[in-house]
Image: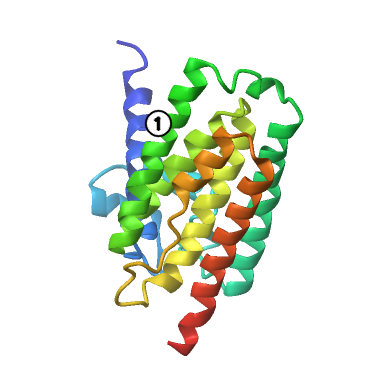
Amino acid sequence: MPGNGSVTRSTLRQQIADALRDEVLAGRLTPGRAFTVKEIAEQYGVSATPVREALVDLSAQGILEADQHRGFRVPEYSLADYRRMLEARGLVTDGMFQALTEAHPALAGMDSPRTVAALAAVRRRGEEAQRAAAAGDLGVLIGYDLRFWRELSGLFGNPYLADFLHRLRVQSWVCAVQHLRRLPDLRGRLWAGHTELVDALARREARAAQEIVAAANAHSLALLERLPRE
């Protein structure tokens, strides 16, 4: 059938991008690690084209950096970078939650069976994230946390908003992982207030939701700031 080649390449491109993103988020590709398209293509046993496209995609998301003449590398983020990421995230979520008190059209049916069911699904993601945080399982936590926020922001009916917040959260996790992986035991040290946030939104308590997120950001930043002393 015509088009099969492009579909296969597109699927391969996504698979490679997903695999490399997981490697970065797991901390297995360390900050400053550089590699070429040829190196990754040989590692996965594929042609250069889907690899190059995957690396460009990850570079656009801030997960990798294009290094002119030398391929790509894992970015090295500082605590100052993390503070700025948290500030950007806070501005986005504050705007989202403020919509609760301004009769935003996308939230007109907040009490509808469909929205209630969607919030219940988001809450389940939050419960899984909390369990992972309590166990100190950073990899599992990141997966559920990203899914939690993706689905939560999707309730506001604006795909551009959801995509933008998702990119910010992925980028901030890439930054945080570079620091958190230095701790031998993360049990009980990671923020785990996901269900509390969902409950506040279900009650349409925008101010409470904003305070929960602000406390989460402060908790994460304080944890990273303590690392040099530990």
* Viewport quadrant of the C terminus: bottom left
Work out whether residue 12 or residue 162 is closer to the camera in this orientation and state it.
162
Quickly name the residue at label 1: 121
Residue at 38%, 69% (x, y): give it.
30
Q: Position of residue 110 (x, y in %)?
A: 59, 23
Work out whether residue 147 or residue 206 is closer to the camera in this orientation and state it.
206
Work out whether residue 214 or residue 227 is closer to the camera in this orientation and state it.
214
Q: Residue furthest top?
A: 1
Work out whether residue 59 or residue 112 is closer to the camera in this orientation and state it.
112
Q: Is residue 153 visible?
A: yes
Residue at 59%, 53% (x, y): give it.
213
Q: Is residue 31 visible?
A: no
Q: Is 109 situated left or right of 11 in this image?
A: right
- For label 1, the SS is helix
Residue at 34%, 70% (x, y): give it.
186
Q: Position of residue 113 (x, y in %)?
A: 48, 16
